[in-house]
Protein backbone atom coordinates (compact mmCIF):
# COMPACT_ATOMS: atom_id res chain seq x y z
CA UNK A 1 0.00 0.00 0.00
CA UNK A 2 1.29 3.46 -0.86
CA UNK A 3 1.17 6.15 1.80
CA UNK A 4 -2.18 7.97 1.69
CA UNK A 5 -2.24 11.76 1.28
CA UNK A 6 -3.06 12.34 4.97
CA UNK A 7 -0.12 10.30 6.32
CA UNK A 8 2.51 13.03 6.31
CA UNK A 9 5.30 11.37 8.29
CA UNK A 10 7.61 14.22 7.33
CA UNK A 11 5.19 16.58 9.14
CA UNK A 12 5.28 15.02 12.62
CA UNK A 13 4.78 17.99 14.92
CA UNK A 14 4.52 16.24 18.26
CA UNK A 15 5.30 12.90 19.84
CA UNK A 16 3.13 12.18 22.83
CA UNK A 17 5.21 11.46 25.96
CA UNK A 18 7.36 8.70 24.50
CA UNK A 19 9.06 8.04 27.83
CA UNK A 20 5.74 7.05 29.42
CA UNK A 21 4.05 5.56 26.37
CA UNK A 22 1.15 7.99 26.39
CA UNK A 23 -0.41 8.35 22.95
CA UNK A 24 0.90 8.52 19.41
CA UNK A 25 2.26 11.04 16.92
CA UNK A 26 0.56 14.22 15.75
CA UNK A 27 0.61 14.88 12.01
CA UNK A 28 -0.06 18.38 10.70
CA UNK A 29 0.08 20.04 7.32
CA UNK A 30 -3.16 18.59 5.99
CA UNK A 31 -6.02 20.61 4.58
CA UNK A 32 -9.10 20.28 6.81
CA UNK A 33 -11.53 17.91 5.16
CA UNK A 34 -8.79 15.69 3.68
CA UNK A 35 -10.08 12.08 3.67
CA UNK A 36 -8.45 9.76 6.24
CA UNK A 37 -8.23 6.15 5.09
CA UNK A 38 -7.63 2.94 7.01
CA UNK A 39 -4.05 1.72 6.72
CA UNK A 40 -4.92 -1.96 7.17
CA UNK A 41 -7.83 -4.38 7.08
CA UNK A 42 -9.29 -5.00 10.50
CA UNK A 43 -12.21 -4.86 12.87
CA UNK A 44 -13.33 -1.63 14.45
CA UNK A 45 -12.92 -1.88 18.24
CA UNK A 46 -13.88 1.68 19.14
CA UNK A 47 -15.36 4.74 17.44
CA UNK A 48 -16.97 7.99 18.48
CA UNK A 49 -16.17 11.37 20.01
CA UNK A 50 -13.88 11.71 23.02
CA UNK A 51 -13.83 14.70 25.33
CA UNK A 52 -10.87 15.95 27.37
CA UNK A 53 -11.27 15.53 31.15
CA UNK A 54 -10.93 19.32 31.60
CA UNK A 55 -13.96 19.90 29.36
CA UNK A 56 -11.87 20.78 26.30
CA UNK A 57 -13.33 20.11 22.87
CA UNK A 58 -13.93 16.56 21.74
CA UNK A 59 -12.85 15.00 18.49
CA UNK A 60 -13.48 11.82 16.57
CA UNK A 61 -11.63 8.56 17.13
CA UNK A 62 -11.64 5.30 15.18
CA UNK A 63 -9.68 2.34 16.60
CA UNK A 64 -9.04 -0.74 14.48
CA UNK A 65 -7.54 -4.07 15.53
CA UNK A 66 -5.28 -5.22 12.71
CA UNK A 67 -2.06 -7.02 11.83
CA UNK A 68 0.93 -4.69 11.67
CA UNK A 69 4.20 -5.85 10.06
CA UNK A 70 6.94 -6.58 12.62
CA UNK A 71 4.48 -6.09 15.50
CA UNK A 72 1.60 -8.51 14.95
CA UNK A 73 -1.97 -8.05 16.18
CA UNK A 74 -2.33 -4.48 17.46
CA UNK A 75 -4.85 -1.72 18.08
CA UNK A 76 -4.29 1.20 15.67
CA UNK A 77 -6.14 4.44 16.36
CA UNK A 78 -6.85 7.54 14.29
CA UNK A 79 -7.82 10.59 16.37
CA UNK A 80 -8.86 14.24 15.86
CA UNK A 81 -10.91 13.34 12.79
CA UNK A 82 -14.51 13.83 11.74
CA UNK A 83 -15.88 10.29 11.45
CA UNK A 84 -17.32 8.92 8.23
CA UNK A 85 -21.14 8.90 8.73
CA UNK A 86 -21.43 5.11 8.20
CA UNK A 87 -19.25 4.29 11.22
CA UNK A 88 -21.38 3.56 14.30
CA UNK A 89 -20.26 4.80 17.73
CA UNK A 90 -19.00 1.98 19.94
CA UNK A 91 -16.36 1.21 22.56
CA UNK A 92 -14.43 -1.53 24.35
CA UNK A 93 -14.52 -3.81 21.31
CA UNK A 94 -18.34 -4.06 21.23
CA UNK A 95 -18.70 -2.60 17.75
CA UNK A 96 -21.46 -4.53 16.01
CA UNK A 97 -19.08 -6.48 13.76
CA UNK A 98 -17.92 -3.33 11.93
CA UNK A 99 -14.81 -3.84 9.79
CA UNK A 100 -12.64 -1.71 7.51
CA UNK A 101 -10.47 -2.46 4.51
CA UNK A 102 -7.13 -0.80 3.80
CA UNK A 103 -7.82 2.36 1.80
CA UNK A 104 -11.42 2.71 3.03
CA UNK A 105 -12.37 6.24 4.11
CA UNK A 106 -12.98 6.33 7.87
CA UNK A 107 -13.22 10.10 8.29
CA UNK A 108 -11.72 13.44 7.36
CA UNK A 109 -9.13 15.76 8.91
CA UNK A 110 -10.98 17.84 11.51
CA UNK A 111 -11.95 21.32 10.32
CA UNK A 112 -10.89 22.95 13.59
CA UNK A 113 -7.40 21.48 13.69
CA UNK A 114 -5.89 20.49 10.35
CA UNK A 115 -3.89 17.95 12.38
CA UNK A 116 -4.55 14.42 13.58
CA UNK A 117 -3.00 11.85 15.88
CA UNK A 118 -2.32 8.22 15.09
CA UNK A 119 -1.00 5.62 17.52
CA UNK A 120 -0.70 1.94 18.37
CA UNK A 121 -1.78 0.10 21.54
CA UNK A 122 -2.33 3.24 23.67
CA UNK A 123 -2.48 3.11 27.48
CA UNK A 124 -6.15 4.10 27.40
CA UNK A 125 -9.30 2.29 26.36
CA UNK A 126 -13.03 2.72 25.66
CA UNK A 127 -13.13 4.48 22.29
CA UNK A 128 -9.58 3.19 21.76
CA UNK A 129 -10.70 -0.44 22.20
CA UNK A 130 -10.70 -2.83 25.14
CA UNK A 131 -7.89 -2.95 27.66
CA UNK A 132 -5.42 -4.59 27.71
CA UNK A 133 -4.39 -4.11 24.10
CA UNK A 134 -2.93 -7.11 22.26
CA UNK A 135 0.59 -5.69 22.19
CA UNK A 136 2.85 -3.08 23.78
CA UNK A 137 2.54 0.65 23.23
CA UNK A 138 5.09 1.72 20.61
CA UNK A 139 6.20 4.88 18.87
CA UNK A 140 4.17 4.28 15.70
CA UNK A 141 6.36 5.97 13.07
CA UNK A 142 8.39 2.91 12.03
CA UNK A 143 5.31 0.66 11.99
CA UNK A 144 3.28 3.18 9.96
CA UNK A 145 6.13 3.27 7.48
CA UNK A 146 6.07 -0.55 7.32
CA UNK A 147 2.30 -0.58 6.76
CA UNK A 148 2.67 1.78 3.80
CA UNK A 149 5.86 0.34 2.29
CA UNK A 150 8.03 3.31 3.28
CA UNK A 151 10.43 1.30 5.45
CA UNK A 152 12.39 -1.75 4.35
CA UNK A 153 11.79 -5.06 6.09
CA UNK A 154 14.55 -5.57 8.68
CA UNK A 155 17.02 -8.34 7.96
CA UNK A 156 16.99 -9.46 11.59
CA UNK A 157 13.99 -9.83 13.92
CA UNK A 158 13.17 -7.44 16.72
CA UNK A 159 13.89 -8.48 20.28
CA UNK A 160 12.76 -6.69 23.44
CA UNK A 161 15.34 -4.83 25.50
CA UNK A 162 14.96 -3.05 28.83
CA UNK A 163 14.74 0.75 28.45
CA UNK A 164 14.69 1.75 32.10
CA UNK A 165 17.51 4.22 31.39
CA UNK A 166 16.72 4.99 27.73
CA UNK A 167 15.31 8.37 26.76
CA UNK A 168 13.72 7.37 23.43
CA UNK A 169 14.47 10.83 22.09
CA UNK A 170 16.98 10.23 19.31
CA UNK A 171 16.09 9.50 15.70
CA UNK A 172 17.70 6.05 16.07
CA UNK A 173 15.52 5.37 19.13
CA UNK A 174 12.38 6.39 17.22
CA UNK A 175 13.17 4.00 14.38
CA UNK A 176 13.94 1.21 16.83
CA UNK A 177 10.41 1.73 18.19
CA UNK A 178 10.68 2.75 21.85
CA UNK A 179 7.72 1.42 23.78
CA UNK A 180 6.17 1.90 27.18
CA UNK A 181 8.24 -0.67 29.06
CA UNK A 182 10.49 -2.11 26.38
CA UNK A 183 12.45 -0.95 23.38
CA UNK A 184 12.47 -3.13 20.30
CA UNK A 185 15.90 -2.95 18.69
CA UNK A 186 17.48 -4.76 15.79
CA UNK A 187 19.66 -7.61 16.96
CA UNK A 188 23.33 -6.98 16.42
Image (spheres, rainbow, N blue to C red):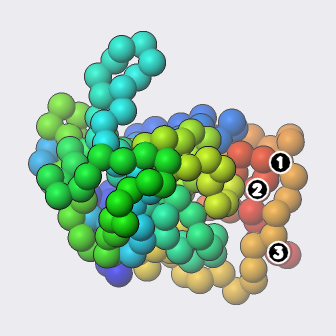
Residue at the disc numbered 3: 187
Res 40 seen here: no
Q: Out of 26 and 135, give the one closest to the viewer.
A: 135
Cα distance in 3D space between marks 2 and 3? 12 Å
Cα distance in 3D space between marks 3 and 1? 15 Å
User: Which mark, residue 183?
Assistant: 2
- Residue at the image position 36 percent from the left and 33 percent from the top: 50
Q: Secondary structure at mark 3?
A: loop
Residue at the disc numbered 1: 163
Numbered disc in front, either 2 or 3: 2
Q: In the image, 65: left or right of 90?
A: right
Q: Quadrant of residue 158?
A: bottom right
N-terminal label among 1 and 2:
1
User: Which mark, residue 33?
Assistant: none
Q: In the image, 72: left or right of 145?
A: right
CB within 8 Å, label 2 to label 3: no
Amino acid sequence: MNAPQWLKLDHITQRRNLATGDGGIVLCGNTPGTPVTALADGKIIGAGTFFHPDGGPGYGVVAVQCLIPDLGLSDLYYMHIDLEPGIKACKNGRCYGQTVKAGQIIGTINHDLGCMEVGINPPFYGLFGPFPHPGPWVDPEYFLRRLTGQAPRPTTPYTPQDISTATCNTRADRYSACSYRRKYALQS
